[in-house]
Structure formats: C-alpha cells, structure tokens
Amino acid sequence: MPTAFVIMPFGARFDPVFMKLISPPLVNAGFEVSRADLTINQHQILKDIVVGIAKADIVIADVTDLNGNVMYELGLAHAMGRRTVMITRDIESLPFDLRAYRATQYSTEFDEAPKLMELIESVARGVLDGSAEFSNPVQDFAPEVLGKSEQVSVAPVSLPLKAGRGSSEAVAEPPPAGLLDIIVELSEEGDLLQGSTQAISEATVKIGETVAARSAQIEKTNKNLGAKAAPVLRQLMKETAKDFQDFNERLVPQNELLRESGTKIGHLTNSLARLRNATSEEEVKRLRDEIDSLTNAEAQFAGAHASVTAFAEVLLGLPNMERTLSTAVQETTVSVLDTAGIIELLRAEFARARSLMEEKLNRVGV
C-alpha cells in the first residue's frame, strides 16, 4: 500500500486538521497515513520522522506558523527528494522563495475546508497514476545529490495501482512535454494571461474613477446641504456600494482566469528552464535573453503587486459610514488581496525559473 507521511505542528489546534481534512482524503485515495507524534515509540520520535519521510510516497507539510520542527522536516523531505505538498493557513507568511513550490492556503471554515480535502485527494491520486508533478529547491539547484535528477517528479515505478482498478502492474509515467510543446503552450497561455491582466487593470481604473466621482458628489452634498445631507449621503453611499459590487463581480472571475493561466505559465516557464542547455554560444545567448525577459517580468509583477496592495490598503482605510457600502468594500478588499496573492505567486515562479537558468550559466562558467 502506498504511504503518506504528514509533518505539522503538534497540539490541539492542528489535530482536527489532520484527522478531518488531511487523513480522510489520503485514505480515500488508497494511502496508509502516518504522523510522527502518533507513533507508539515516543522515545525515538526523530527516528520515526526520518524513516517516515524516507519511505513516504507523498509528504504533506503544514507550514502554518513556520514552526521550526516542521521547517526542518520539510528540509529533510526536500533533501530526500520526496513528493511534497505544502499547505498553510497564511500564504503571506511563507518565505518568498518557497511560494513557487505550490504552497496552498487553506481555511478551517465550514465552506472552505472541503477545498483542502479535494486538493489533497487529487494530488494523491495523481501520485498513483503518474500525473502529479513535483519539484523542490534541491532538485532545481543540486539535483546530483538526489542520485537521479528527476527523482521527485517521476511516478513511483514499483507502486501498485489502487485496489479495485483490476491491475497490480507498475504505473507508467506519461511522456514529458517537449521543448516545442512548452514554447507553444507558453505563447497561448501568455495571451490568456495578458487578457486577464488587461481586464483587471481596466476594471480597477474604472472603479477608481467612479469612486473619485462619488466622493466629489459626497463632498458637494455635505457642503450644500449641511445638517440635511444625511438621507442624500446615504443614497450616494448605496450607489457607491453598487459600484463596488459591480467591480467585484468582474474581478472574481478574472482572478480565477489569472490564477489558472498564472499557474500554467509558472509550470511551463520552469519546465522550459530545466530543458534549456548552455553547451553552445547560441544556447548561452538564448539563456541570457530569457533571463533578461524574466527579470523584466519580475519587475513588472513586483510593481503590479505593489499597486494592487496599495489599492487594498486604501479600501481597508475607508470609514464605516453605511452598512451596504462597508459590506461591499470588505468583499472587494478580499478579492483585491486575492489578485495580489496571485501576482506574487507568479513573480515567485518567474524568480525560480530565472534562478534555474542562472545556475546553468554558473555551472559552465559564463
């Protein structure tokens, strides 16, 4: 039976996450699940952790609060080339360099918790059928220590299929995408990403202009009506709330498109970085050009992230003067912060790909 090992902080705050959100989907996918603190042998818990990670077909790491023990164990999993899934309750607290390695934010709220279960079961089943891809900093920058450069991204060749599928044969890994496949897909996804970012930019400019106009109306009403302004001000604020609601209705689906395209582009860009060589002058020049392009893209996304975050801070600073408006502003702030998080993740993906390409140049001394 395939095995899953869970590394996470110990204690009452995290026990329900393990028992209700992490373990059930892994069991449903056909895995035997273990966690170090559940072992009988409490006197050799470090041994159990090291052995558990070393033998695991998949490792789930809850890096919430950046617990020292968990981060150490995450490093062990990376160094051993284990297939590792990082989850956290606060993606913003995660070090920038790690965000590109598919950390997923989760919530224990009733409506949100099932999303984590679906993700874990999907990845676990992907391990079984060879469709799930993994990587980590060791594979990226020191693959020789793993003994096999693609160790963390291959299907487990001796891992049996889940019982009930009618076969116990080894799972074959699907053929990897070729260089031309990646370049074509990057071009296609780049167009989609540009469309989403353009739509978000236009909607943001429009809401900014609309709110500025509403603010001018509110100021004029206050000046002209004085003590009698309250009913008119309330109506203006309700109209402003409708403006924010309309903006949010446009932003939410664009965020999903941005997330989907950004995730694909991040994966494709890093795949391209791994396939590039630096064995000829032409290849070295191509790598340098692509490094320059990625550096420029990082700078653009850094600027976009700063701009979107500043907009969110403006929203957070708006006074609570009318219930409908306050609710609309809160919902919009959540969506705007989601946009910022997606942009930051894409920037991290580009930074990772650039570092991979720079490492290839460093290895050949150019």
Image (tube, rainbow, N blue to C red):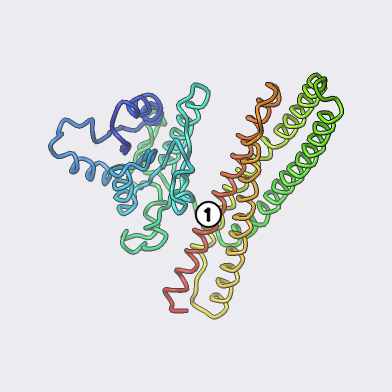
> As rendered, which of 331 and 58 lies closer to the eye?
331
Residue drawn at (65%, 58%) of the image: 184
Residue 339, compared with residue 35, is above or below; it is below
Q: Amino acid at mark 1?
A: Glu
Q: In terms of depth relative to the viewer, which is nearer, 104 or 278? A: 104
Q: Please tell me which residue is depicted at 52% across the width and 63% down the height of the picture.
A: 354
Which of the pair 284/240 is nearer the observer?
240
Q: Quadrant of residue 281?
A: bottom right
The residue that appears at 64% across and 58% down in the rendered structure is 300
Q: Is residue 289 left or right of residue 55?
A: right
Q: Residue at x 47, y 79 (%)?
A: 366
- Image coordinates for residue 275, horizontal then vertical, percent: 51, 64
Indicate left or right for 167 with 230 as reference. left
Q: Position of residue 358 (x, y in %)?
A: 48, 69
Q: Residue 231, relative to residue 281: is it above or below? A: above
Query: Callout 1: 10 Å neighbours few (<14), some, many (20+)?
Result: many
In the rendered picture of this protein, how many numbered marks are placed on residues?
1
Q: Residue furthest left?
A: 43
What percent of the width, then of the height, locates residue 25?
41, 29
Residue furthest toward the front? Answer: 227
x, y percent for residue 215: 78, 35
**Left or right of 246 in this view: 79:** left
Query: Residue 252 is drawn in which quadrant?
Result: top right
Q: Which residue is mark 1?
A: 349
Dividing the picture into quarters, in which one does residue 1 lie?
A: top left
Element marked by disc 1: helix
Q: Residue furthest bottom?
A: 281
